């Protein structure tokens, strides 16, 4: 009897996870491996190009898209621990490179095999965590791109439901933007500040001690606000919990 | 351009003022998610709602491909019914045409149903300057007219006014009424406004309304209202003027029904507005009532220039307001901050299209691209995509702020050189990790004031993932 072939999965780490929270990268590798994938981390990766794309610098965004395609197209799957960067590859690369000889087809091909990590684990691998514990109440924020561009909504909740000791309490308006928005948060700081304070208030009102989400940008924004407001709310990427790697300091927490 | 000076250029100052305006913030909180819940329930109650959205999108796309044909058909029908169609290329043309009609009618008072095109063309101020008194008959419009303001929302123009300020306003303005009268709730306010407006309906020589649609096959104009004020405004005076923009045209009555099925559900969460009124021209011999003259003034004001560009899809907009009801940015600052006639996501796309990106360029930047507007737009207008197009135009024309342009260039320089990027991020994260390690975050960081003025900045763990991964791989290989 032949073993089913383990899919070769390339991890697109994302620039924020790479720089700020490697734990999320290792959680991704751990979960993907446990789900039956052979994980590789292409060395040529930096960023998906979204900062340029959303700032109106289409040419730079196209160049970065081509680099990512070249570095990642040789794998069975490309998996991203971010709905936002994932949507950039899945939805926006084909639009950006539409009509470019050669690249248009390559962009569509990469798009069709790129997934946000939690939805990949559930929808493609039928994975569910076993023997993972997390004591306490958590609440989950639906990051915009993952939710509205990639349909990530039920999957994280389903997986969290299998974590022993974890109680998920929904906040009001979990699907309303936290106000991060990439460069938006520094270009429109007052509006962003208001949006994130609404978000932390909703999260805190659940009584949960931990705020989870699937995008590090949103998480840094919400963690930073909760800390500025003195709220006892720890922010973590959802896969830290799913991988059983939630015992270190939360985002923005000191090591002491 | 409108007769009113736009303030979209000073969007950032507008935002700061809006944030500090306690009365506005109170009104925004009170209005809050009301529309959102109602729209969701109304859309959810129609199993084929998504299919109707597709049909609406397709019919408007078809119209925009054949705008000239349908407008010609419409004009023919209106003329055949004894009405007049006037073509206004600019807002100024519209003002002049309206004034001419009013003068010929000997008008001293003009009653108005709710119309955003009137706002776009600056009709009220212009009529006043020419000795004609416009009277707004929609309750919200009436309130802001008394306050000398402009609408802050396209379907709820006075949404920025808390209820108790309406009471104060009415006591201040309606001095002929007993001072000790009860104005405790919305219904008493409504009934007072109704009583006052009721008299005015009979005084006006001209009635002006907008149009939610113009129907090519019948030559009718359609308005929807919840107060019935539009009906009285247009049927009692001897002259009825319809103000509309070109893209309001739909081919058939059937198509109008498609739009109607989307409009109220998306706007207020009603199945239908309370009144839906079809106007077919001047009073015919056998009609019991109706105006003696019927005029339609069609405004272009830059719209035909949008046809065939990446902004064409914006012309599908049916002005339901769902995008702003669902927009967290609009909900934080209200409509006036946008600085011109149209606020929220639709305004962020339309304003630079109609009055120029130099004037309105900050608006398409005031979005997180959260996509909630596109998710609820009945016409499936890709609003974030079009806001991004505006950012691209600004970038191409070097209108984007210098700091942003240099920032992107610097970042791209590294991001396009992976080896250098590795070194730079490793060094930077090492330093940041050391500096912030104990506390885990920064309350202040040089060059990051936009972030740290409002929230702490989480410190990195210290080692980059790529460095840690390379190390782990090496160890594995050595074993």
Image (cartoon, coloured by chain):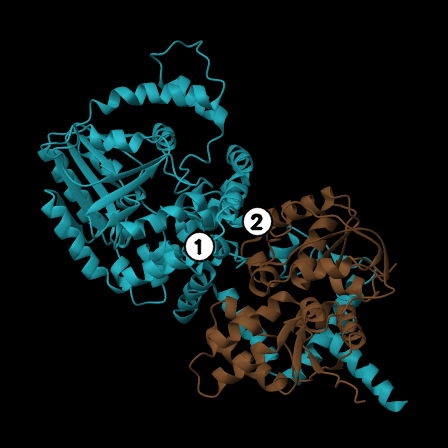
Q: Colour of chain B?
A: cyan
The chain letter of the brown chain reads: A
Identify the element where label 1 is drawn. Answer: helix
Task: Give the quarter of the image for residue B191.
Answer: top left
| Residue ID at (39%, 43%) | B154
Position of B467 compared to A79: left or right?
right
Q: Is residue B207 above or below residue B336?
A: above
Q: Position of residue B235 (x, y in %)?
A: 21, 31
Chain letter of the residue beneath label 2 in the structure image: A
Residue B394 x %, y %: 41, 65
**Can see residue B118?**
no
| Label 2 Cα crowd, 10 Å radius (few <14 / some 14-19 / many 20+) | many
The chain letter for the residue carrying disc 1 is B
Asked whether residue B223 is in view, the answer is yes
Q: Secondary structure at mark 2?
A: helix
Instruction: For marks 2 and 1, give the CA distance.
Output: 15 Å
Q: Are marks 2 and 1 in contact (CB under 8 Å)?
A: no
Mark number displayed over residue B395:
none
Instruction: From the image, tell me which residue sits under label 1.
Output: B363
Between B173 and B51, the one lying in front of the other is B51
Q: Quadrant of residue B64?
A: bottom left
Q: Quadrant of the N terminus of chain A?
A: bottom right
Residue drawn at 30 percent across, 42 percent down? B119
Q: Are there few (<14), some (14-19), or many (20+) residues within 10 Å of tag 1?
A: many
B243 relative to A76 in the view: left or right: left
Tell me what residue is drawn at x 26 percent, y 62 percent. B305
On the same chain, marks 2 and 1? The answer is no
Q: Nearer the viewer, mark 2 or mark 1?
A: 1
Residue B195 image position (x, y, % from top left): 33, 18
Q: Which residue is mark 2?
A: A190
In the displayed orientation, state which residue is furthest to the right: B479
């Amino acid at each position: 009897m032949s073993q089913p072939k383990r899919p070769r999965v390339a991890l697109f780490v994302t620039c924020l996870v790479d720089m700020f929270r490697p734990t999320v990268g290792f959680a991704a590798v751990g979960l993907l491996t446990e789900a039956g994938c052979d994980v590789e981390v292409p060395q040529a990766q930096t960023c998906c190009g979204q900062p340029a794309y959303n700032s109106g610098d289409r040419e730079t965004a196209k160049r970065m898209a081509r680099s990512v395609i070249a570095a990642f197209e040789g794998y069975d799957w490309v998996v991203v621990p971010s709905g936002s960067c994932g949507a950039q590859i899945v939805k926006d690369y084909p639009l950006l490179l539409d009509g470019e000889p050669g690249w248009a087809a390559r962009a569509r091909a990469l798009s069709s095999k790129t997934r946000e990590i939690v939805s990949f684990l559930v929808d493609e691998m039928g994975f569910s965590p076993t023997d993972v514990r997390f004591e306490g109440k958590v609440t989950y924020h639906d990051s915009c791109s993952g939710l509205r561009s990639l349909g990530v909504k039920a999957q994280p909740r389903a997986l969290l439901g299998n974590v022993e000791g974890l109680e998920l309490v929904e906040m009001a308006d979990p699907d309303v933007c936290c106000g991060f928005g990439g460069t938006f948060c520094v270009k429109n700081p007052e509006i962003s500040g208001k949006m994130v304070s609404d978000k932390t208030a909703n999260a805190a009102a659940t009584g949960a001690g931990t705020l989870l989400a699937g995008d590090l940008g949103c998480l840094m924004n919400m963690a930073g606000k909760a800390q500025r407001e003195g709220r006892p709310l720890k922010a973590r990427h959802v896969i830290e919990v799913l991988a059983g790697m939630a015992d270190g300091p939360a985002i923005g927490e000191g090591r002491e | 351009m409108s007769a009113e000076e736009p303030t979209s250029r000073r969007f950032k100052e507008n935002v700061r003022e809006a944030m500090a305006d306690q009365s506005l913030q109170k009104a925004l909180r009170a209005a809050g998610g009301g529309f959102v819940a109602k729209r969701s329930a109304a859309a959810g109650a129609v199993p084929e709602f998504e299919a109707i959205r597709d049909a609406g999108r397709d019919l408007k796309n078809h119209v925009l491909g054949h705008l000239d044909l349908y407008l010609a058909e419409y004009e023919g029908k209106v003329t055949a019914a004894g009405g007049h169609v006037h073509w206004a290329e600019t807002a100024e043309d519209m003002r002049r045409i309206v004034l001419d009609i009013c003068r010929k009618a000997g008008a001293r008072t003009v009653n108005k149903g709710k119309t955003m095109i009137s706002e776009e063309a600056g009709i009220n101020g212009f009529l006043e300057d020419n000795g004609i008194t416009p009277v707004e008959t929609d309750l919200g419009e009436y309130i802001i007219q008394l306050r000398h303001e402009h609408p802050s929302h396209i379907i709820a123009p006075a949404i920025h006014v808390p209820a108790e300020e309406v009471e104060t306003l009415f006591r201040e303005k309606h001095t002929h009424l007993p001072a000790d009268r009860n104005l405790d709730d919305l219904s008493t306010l409504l009934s007072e406004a109704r009583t006052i407006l009721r008299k005015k309906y009979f005084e006006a020589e001209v009635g002006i309304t907008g149009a939610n649609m113009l129907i090519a096959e019948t030559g009718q104009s359609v308005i929807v209202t919840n107060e019935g004020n539009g009906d009285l405004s247009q049927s009692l005076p001897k002259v009825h003027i319809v103000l509309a923009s070109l893209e309001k045209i739909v081919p058939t009555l059937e198509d109008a029904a498609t739009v109607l099925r989307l409009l109220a559900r998306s706007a207020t969460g009603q199945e239908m507005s309370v009144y839906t009124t079809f106007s077919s021209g001047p009073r015919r011999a056998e009609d019991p009532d109706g105006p003696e003259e019927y005029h339609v003034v069609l405004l272009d004001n830059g719209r035909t220039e949008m046809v065939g560009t990446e902004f064409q899809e914006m012309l599908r907009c049916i002005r339901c307001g769902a995008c702003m009801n669902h927009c967290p940015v609009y909900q934080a600052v209200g409509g006036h901050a946008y600085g011109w006639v149209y606020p929220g996501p639709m305004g962020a796309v339309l304003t630079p299209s109609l009055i120029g990106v130099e004037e309105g360029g900050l608006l398409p930047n005031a979005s997180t691209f959260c996509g909630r507007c596109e998710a609820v737009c009945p016409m499936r207008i890709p609003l974030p995509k079009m806001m991004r197009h505006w950012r691209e135009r600004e970038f191409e024309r070097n209108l984007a702020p210098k700091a942003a342009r240099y920032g992107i260039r610097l970042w791209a320089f590294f991001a396009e050189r992976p080896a250098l990027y590795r070194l730079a991020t490793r060094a930077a994260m090492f330093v940041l990790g050391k500096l912030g390690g104990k506390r885990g975050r920064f309350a202040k960081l040089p060059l990051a004031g936009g972030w740290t003025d409002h929230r702490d900045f989480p410190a990195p763990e210290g080692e980059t993932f790529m460095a840690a991964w390379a190390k782990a791989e090496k160890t594995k290989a050595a074993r």
